[in-house]
Image: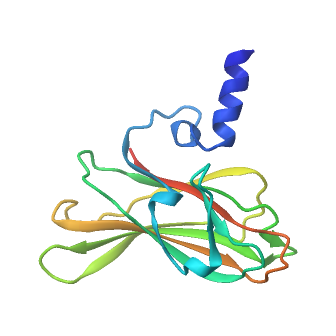
Amino acid sequence: MIKKALMAVLASFGLIAAATPHANATIQETWTSIAAACTVQGEQLAYVNPIYGTVSFAANEAGDFYLTCPVGSINLIPTRMGLTFYNDNGTIGGVNHCFVTAVLQRASFQIETGADLVTVSSVGSQTAGHQFFDGPINYQGQLFGSYYWVTVQLHRDSATAACNPVFVGAILYK
């Protein structure tokens, strides 16, 4: 009973979400980041929760802001990227009032070219509670010899919207 209660508490804080995105899968993490570890661009719109490390819209704010999450050293080649978030009432009646989108990006060390390797988004999804969305990484060329980062966009169309998307964290895994 205590173990079940502890697992529920950890899951509600996003501490075990990345450990069990697929019931039968074994996760091999290559990189993780909580939202608060990322750099916010559009600070006046954002609220960084100092207790849980999440990022959402500040009170009475709307629009779009972005977070940049640098990916450090990767020793194991990831095949998937996951995004943990909350977005209750984000889509109502087919209208996206709020959403969270994350893109894994890369740029070559030698030339200023890059690519988006995977996009994970809540656009069009009717969700409630803690969410874990993921997608396969599309490698074009070799993994090493490039810079990698995850760009996360939070969108809210009105300061009075019934939604306020909350970014919890991102993971690259195999």
Is 127 displayed left or right of 150 in the figure? right
- State the image quarter where residue 83 is shown: bottom right
Q: Is residue 161 left or right of residue 153?
A: right
Q: Within the image, what quadrant is residue 72 found in?
A: bottom left
How many numbered discs, if any?
A: 0
Seen from the viewer's position, the closer of residues 143 and 62 is 62
Q: Is residue 54 above or below residue 92?
A: above
Residue under the point 59% across and 55% down: 50
Does residue 122 show up?
no
Name the quarter where the C terminus is drawn. top left
Location of the N terminus (image quadrant):
top right
Percent x, y of residue 130: 70, 49
Tell me what residue is drawn at x 52 percent, y 36 percent: 19
Horizontal side, residue 171 vs residue 65: left or right: left
Residue 87 in view = yes
Is 115 or 154 nearer to us in this picture?
154
Q: Position of residue 69 (x, y in %)?
A: 41, 64
Q: Which residue is farthest top?
A: 1
Q: Residue at x 54, y 31 (%)?
A: 24
